[in-house]
Image: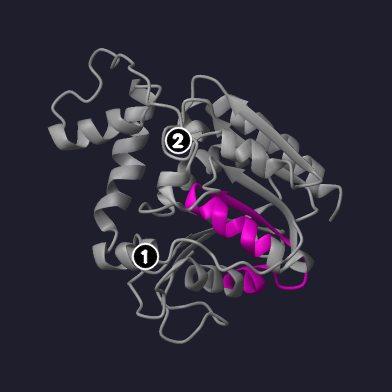
């Protein structure tokens, strides 16, 4: 199901593209994308995870200014984006707690949403999460010098291939297909002005809320040159029920570069959360 209009409960003037997969009566899993991509960064890999794990309702959203969601003057930084996530979270949770999955900036927002509303969040998963908004302050490794698999990107636009090579640690056909089908379209769809406004207010205002205490999974790529893994290690120390996994041979797209391992980790997390519902 796709909603071209804003779902009920989300603030007037903010229209969201939302895709829901699964049965209405199942507990919801709200997926929050990174910046400046859209829901497609999670859609195909997560659906492969859930293909053998029925009983969950997956909710994929494009935040304002990303993907098919128009930009909104009301969304001028991460605090405003968080307000949208919180309103959508409350709506999809309905009468039972929901789960949150966030990738990169989406992990930053998902964690803040879980802190703000632990009463409606049953579990939190963060994939290569942004934990330090200021890029200059992040503890990141250099991007590794890896070899492009033969035939990958043949005939592609050189700028697109260069962008892939700047983020990909595993530069094989599987990752290139994902990048071409699920990352590039999001990059191209993002509203540049909306992205600039978000990044001008990238850091969330401190709230003093305690860390989320429910089942938590944090997956980081050891070669992630975008957000790094050491900041995620420090962040995980705050969370009482966090499983932290740092995957070698993975960068900022660890959920695709090490898809089988991440799928198993997500499956274990889902089992832990299910026991609490």
Callout 1: SS: helix
Find the residue positioned furthest to the bottom. Answer: 12
Residue 246 occupies quadrant: top right
In this view, 274 is above or below 266: below
How far is mark 1 from mark 2, CA to CA?
Answer: 22 Å
Label 2 packing within 10 angstroms: few (<14), some (14-19), many (20+): many
Q: Residue at x 51, y 70 (%)?
A: 79
Left or right of 37, for residue 81: right
Q: Is residue 207 visible?
A: yes
In this view, 191 is above or below 51: below
Return the residue at label 2.
Answer: 252
Residue 236 occupies quadrant: top right
Asked if the stretch drawn in magenta spans residue 94, the answer is yes
Left or right of 72, for residue 152: left
Q: Which residues are magenta?
A: 88-114
Callout 2: SS: loop
Residue 254: x %, y % from top left: 50, 32
Query: Does the residue at mark 1 contact the one at mark 2 (Cβ under 8 Å)?
Result: no
Q: Of marks 1 and 2, which one's residue comes earlier in the chain?
A: 1
Return the residue at label 1.
Answer: 200
Residue 201: x %, y % from top left: 42, 66
Q: Residue at x 52, y 72 (%)?
A: 84
Q: Nearer the viewer, residue 189 or 131?
A: 131
Q: How is the image coloured?
A: one colour
Q: Nearer the viewer, residue 178 or 2?
A: 178
Label 1 packing within 10 angstroms: few (<14), some (14-19), many (20+): few
């Amino acid at each position: 199901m796709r909603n071209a209009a804003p779902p009920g409960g989300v603030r007037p003037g903010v229209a969201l593209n939302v895709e829901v997969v699964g049965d209405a009566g199942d507990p919801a899993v709200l997926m929050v994308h990174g910046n400046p991509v859209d829901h497609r960064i999670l859609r195909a890999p997560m659906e492969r995870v859930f293909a053998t794990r029925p009983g969950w309702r997956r909710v994929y959203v494009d935040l304002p200014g990303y993907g098919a969601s128009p930009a909104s003057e009301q969304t001028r930084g991460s605090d405003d984006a968080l307000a949208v996530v919180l309103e959508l979270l409350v709506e999809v949770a309905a009468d039972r707690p929901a789960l949150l999955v966030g990738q990169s900036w989406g992990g930053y927002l998902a964690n803040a949403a879980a802190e703000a509303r632990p009463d409606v969040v049953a579990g939190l998963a963060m994939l290569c999460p942004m934990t330090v908004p200021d890029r200059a302050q992040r503890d990141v490794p250099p991007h590794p010098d890896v070899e492009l698999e033969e035939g990958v990107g043949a005939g592609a636009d050189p700028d697109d291939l260069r962008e892939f090579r700047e983020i990909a640690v595993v530069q094989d056909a599987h990752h290139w297909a994902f990048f071409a089908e699920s990352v590039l379209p999001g990059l191209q769809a993002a509203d540049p002005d909306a992205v600039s406004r978000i990044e001008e207010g990238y850091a969330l205002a401190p709230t003093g809320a305690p860390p989320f205490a429910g089942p938590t999974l944090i997956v980081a790529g050891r070669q992630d040159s975008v957000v790094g893994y050491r900041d995620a290690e420090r962040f995980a120390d705050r969370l009482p029920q966090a499983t932290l996994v740092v995957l070698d041979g993975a960068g900022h797209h660890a959920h695709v570069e090490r898809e089988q391992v991440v799928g198993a980790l997500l499956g274990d997390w889902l089992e832990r959360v299910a026991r609490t519902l």
